[in-house]
Image (cartoon, rainbow, N blue to C red):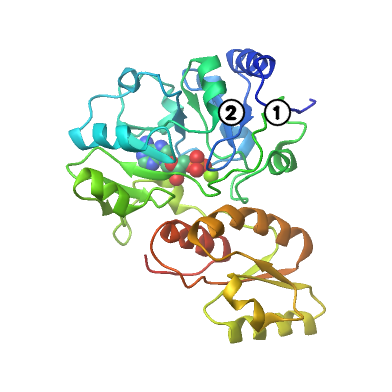
Amino acid sequence: METRILGNSRSAMELAKAYIEAGEAVAFHTETVYGLGANAFSDEAVLKIYALKGRPADNPLIVHVHRDYDISRLTDGEPAYAAALRRAFLPGPLTMVYPSSGKVSRYVSCGLQTLAVRVPSSPVAQAFLKAVNLPVAAPSANLSKHVSPVTAQHVLDDFGGKIPLILDGGACTGGIESTVLDCTGEVPAILREGLVTREQIARIAGDCRVYVPAEGEKPKSPGMAYKHYSPRCKTACCRSAEEALRLYENEETGGGKPMILCESALLPRFSGREVLDLGETDAEMARRLYTLLRQGEKRATLLVGVMPSGRGGAMAGVLNRFTRAFGGDHET
Ligand code: AMP
Ligand code: MG
């Protein structure tokens, strides 16, 4: 199958609509990462997403709709705080988990009684969702466990020849996946950290918890249980430049090709070494992380990540992805 890459034009959206109606999967730009979408009402189309990605059957999908879509068609009631959050943050990088009305394919939520809904702000995503005028089930457009895609080329690298169309909107400005927020309880609870922060949510909703599964408990957001965002080379997670240098020298002595990924402030400590610059601010680090992981896996045998020092803002989301990519622990 030829994979076409098209921008935001009427003919591209008409083609996308035809593919979605025919039960195909179409990749599309969003402000977070690229998504791989299919008709959420169709069992076959939704199952195709799992098959293409190699995604575990118990990791549910987020349903994407355009800004004028009536979400109450898919959900079963919402608390007052959720309506306020919708008005404050949508369209944007916030996924809201509601009680489901059971209208979409049961494979979207993998047997959960809830449905995750998102209204992306990217003009390409809006044009696409408006054209199809259906809820589109879409996880990130990467092979399961691999690094999420933030350019059309990244999508092509994972799905070239396997999907008919990528709707190209350029590099994603957000760079990490949406914040997933459980809106089924009295107080909203973050299931996955992202670009919309706990502080921003609490300001509107009055309060916001960060859900942490108890020891041995099945996580409420099943995706968080899996190894994720992993480059296809060896990785190591460090807390200091000294540790990173030690691992770097070891790898080089053994005939390997190490690279270090770190925040800009640490660059002087690694002069003469192969380094990938994560940037300075939380937004910059979010935007660059996945591109650098994909660059690193192509060039290095060992990628050494030095944990960024910043906190606050979107850093909780950045550190979450960083540690899951490199394999480390962190407190948020
Ligand atoms: P992805 O789109 O690949 O970033 O993955 C979607 C994320 O949303 C995963 O972490 C899922 O576990 C989570 N998710 C999707 N639907 C639900 C739901 N109904 N309840 C809780 N988490 C969900
Ligand atoms: Mg994903």
- Against 305, residue 292 (above or below) is above
In which image quadrant can residue 273 be found? bottom right
Dot 1: few (<14), some (14–19), or many (≥20) neighbours within 10 Å?
many
Q: What amino acid type is highlighted by mark number 2? A: Val
Relative depth, front residue between 133 and 313: 313
Query: Which residue is painted at 25% across and 24% down in the image?
Result: 76
Is 94 positioned to the left or the right of 127 in the image? Answer: left
- Against 148, residue 156 (above or below) is above
Query: Which residue is painted at 65% across and 66% down in the image?
Result: 277
* Residue tagged 1: 163
- Against 120, residue 204 (above or below) is below
Under tag 1, what secondary structure? loop
Q: Quick one: label 1 or label 2, which is nearer the N terminus?
A: 2
Relative depth, front residue between 141 and 310: 310
In which image quadrant can residue 293 be found? bottom right
Say whether residue 195 is visible.
yes
Say whether residue 56 is visible.
no
**Residue 205 in picture, x, y percent from top left:** 22, 44
Relative depth, front residue between 174 and 55: 174
* Residue tagged 2: 124
**Residue 323 in picture, x, y percent from top left:** 51, 64
Query: Which residue is painted at 56% across and 22% down in the image?
Result: 127
